[in-house]
Amino acid sequence: MRYFNYLTPDEQKALFYLPPTSFDNHSSKEVLASSIGAALYMPATRPTIAENIAFGKVEGLVSAILDLEDAVGENEVHAAEESLIHQMSKLATFIELGILNKENMPLLFVRVRSANQLNYLIERLEDDVALLTGFVFPKFTADNGETYFRILENYNDEKSASSPALYGLPILESSAIIYKESRFQSLQSIKHILDTYKDLVLNVRIGATDFSSLFGLRRSPEMTIYDISPIRDCVADIINVFGRVDSSYVISGPVWEYFPHKGLIREVMLDKENGLTGKTIIHPTHIKPVQSLYTVSHEEYTDAASIVANSNGDFGVIRSEYANKMNEIKPHLNWARKILLRSQIYGVLHEQQQYSGLLSSNRAYV
């Protein structure tokens, strides 16, 4: 899989100083954690999941979350499980028949309802589980979290050497996290679990919709989640606990739940400024704007490359090649390393190009 693989060679050459590189679910955890991008929710009951993926019906799709939780009614759970198993089997058949090239396979995740369901699905999917990159754990708490990761650990210990690792993606969305009096104890308890199973934690996700519901709130389509004060404060504390350099967890931006995109661009920009990478989305038209915003500008890339190249101790500060700022080696080094990783995944735009160039003309979204 590669970002913006729908571009023609001429379009790619015109837009990118350095094009995105390829990755798949065998890639390193560091690459995969930052590669999820715009993760599209798909209800597991959808009967066309395999066809949509195999025949590229969703242009730009790089990652998808097949949902067995909120998108599935209580009376649909068994049917949804059977549908998921059937769709994964069809994907495996499409690969065997050469209809789907594994290189074009998006990163696939399954959002489960419980640890028991996780265990059940791993057993039922059998060899087809290797088509997944991981499982999403909703309403993750200190009480249920370790059970999820023990199941994943057992699978990874017993899987064949040729099968990719399966990762866990906990969603922080419980009342114990959003309520101020219990927040820090809850976050520290969760961090202890994640630190124990760190090799299996792909990224940390924020369930802002569930947080908002506890206050009877919902952001308007022209606003962002950062405009809702209690949610903004909680997001800040999650970043403070899990986003520190010595923690090195990748944190994903909250879901954008509207079909219109009026506030989406601004919210993704604020996600990025706060160190979040990727976003959960609910509509295919959100894929391109979100992923385009994660491309690296030429200025960001030259600054980052210069900082890393001069981090051998010979300099403390150097002037940017753009002659508009000073780059301090030590304070900016961690930022620079993140930019260089992102540049591999999402590419570096030419000097005069902006993310909007990826949305222009017939590639614009509506």
Image: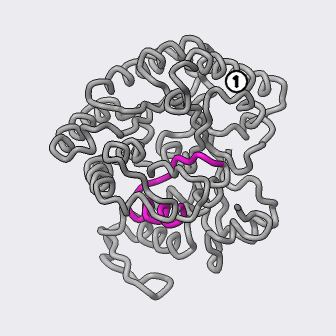
Front-most of residues 113 and 125: 113
Q: Residue at x 53, y 76 (%)?
A: 299
Q: Residue at x 73, y 53 (%)?
A: 5
Q: In the displayed structure, would residue 133 be above or below residue 355?
A: above
Q: Quadrant of residue 67?
A: top right
Q: Quadrant of the C terminus?
A: bottom right
Tell me if 65 is positioned left or right of 218 in this view: right
Residue furthest to the bottom: 323
Amino acid, disc 1: Gln
Residue 86: where, in percent of width, then height? 69, 18
Residue 130: where, in percent of width, then height? 61, 24
Front-most of residues 360 and 301: 360
Residue range corresponding to the magenta coloring: 264-283
Q: Quadrant of residue 7?
A: bottom right
| Residue 188 on the magenta span | no
Front-most of residues 83 and 277: 83
Q: In the displayed structure, would residue 66 be above or below residue 325?
A: above
Residue located beneath label 1 in the image = 87
Question: For the residue labelled by badge 1, is the local secondary structure a helix, a strand or a loop?
Answer: helix
Q: How is the image coloured?
A: one colour
Residue 163: where, in percent of width, then height? 59, 23
| Residue 268 on the magenta span | yes
Tell me if 250 is positioned left or right of 214 in this view: right
Front-most of residues 315 and 277: 277
Q: In the displayed structure, would residue 139 be above or below residue 346?
A: above
**Residue 250 visible here:** no
Q: Residue at x 64, y 45 (%)?
A: 62
Q: Quadrant of the N terminus?
A: top right
Pointer 1 local density, CA inside 10 Å: few below 14, some 14–19, many at least 20: many
Residue 245: where, in percent of width, then height? 31, 53
